[in-house]
Image: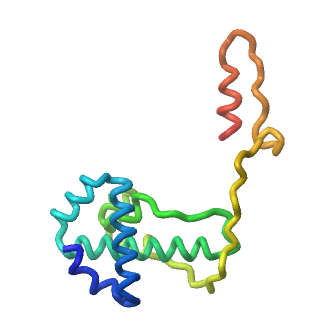
């Protein structure tokens, strides 16, 4: 079933389809395990797998659009939603499945720019940055941990 769907994804090159296929398998196995992937491959019909692969390819494109946009303040990644069918997404979010496709496949129309990748520091002292207050000693009540937890929110 999986191999027959390459025709759908070969708009670019065979390498692109192979890459999407490998990324899909890796992402699906990450969230559902190898057993889950094997069960999917055994039970899925070609329509379901085609939908999953097309949704995944759209998610990859959206991720690339976001990560290539220098104005974004975050880095997008693939997650368990990127390997779902439209029906599964609609069920997860309590949406009308007929409208779900448009909500999940919106892409940026902005011109892509290479995004400068910033190296994350090895450590961050949030106290010196003012984002976290110091732990307050409340005596013997044992609630000093609550101040750190609440201020992190």
Which residue is at a point 27% across and 76% down the rendered structure image? 50
Q: Horizontal and vertical percent for residue 66? A: 58, 72
Residue 42 screen position, x and y as percent: 16, 63
Front one among 5 and 81: 5
The colour style of the image is rainbow
Q: Quadrant of the N terminus?
A: bottom left
Task: Identify the residue at the far top of this view.
Answer: 140
- Image: 17 above or below 24: below
From the viewer's perspective, is 10 left or right of 35?
A: right
Which x, y percent locates residue 52? 31, 70
The structure residue drawn at horizontal position 70% and vertical position 60%, both measured from the top left corner, is 119
Q: Nearer the viewer, residue 107 or 33?
A: 33
* 48 sits to left or right of 119: left
Residue at x 70% of width, y 49% of height: 122
Residue 10, percent from left and from top: 34, 87
Depth order, front residue of 19/131: 19
Q: Is residue 47 above or below residue 128?
A: below
The C terminus - image quarter: top right
Q: Residue at x 37, y 54 (%)?
A: 31
Q: How many marks?
A: 0
Residue 12 quadrant: bottom left
């Amino acid at each position: 079933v999986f191999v027959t769907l390459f025709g759908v994804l070969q708009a670019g090159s065979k390498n692109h389809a192979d890459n999407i296929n490998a990324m899909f398998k890796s992402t699906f196995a990450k969230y559902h395990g190898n057993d889950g992937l094997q069960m999917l491959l055994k039970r899925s019909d070609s329509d379901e797998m085609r939908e999953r692969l097309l949704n995944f390819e759209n998610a990859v494109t959206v991720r690339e659009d976001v990560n290539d946009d220098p104005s974004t303040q975050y880095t997008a990644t693939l997650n368990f939603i990127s390997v779902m069918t439209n029906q599964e997404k609609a069920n997860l979010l309590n949406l009308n499945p007929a409208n779900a496709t448009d909500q999940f496949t919106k892409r940026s129309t902005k011109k892509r720019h290479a995004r400068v990748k910033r190296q994350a520091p090895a450590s961050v002292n949030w106290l010196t940055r003012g984002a976290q207050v110091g732990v307050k000693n409340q005596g013997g009540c044992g609630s000093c941990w609550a101040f750190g937890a609440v201020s992190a929110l």
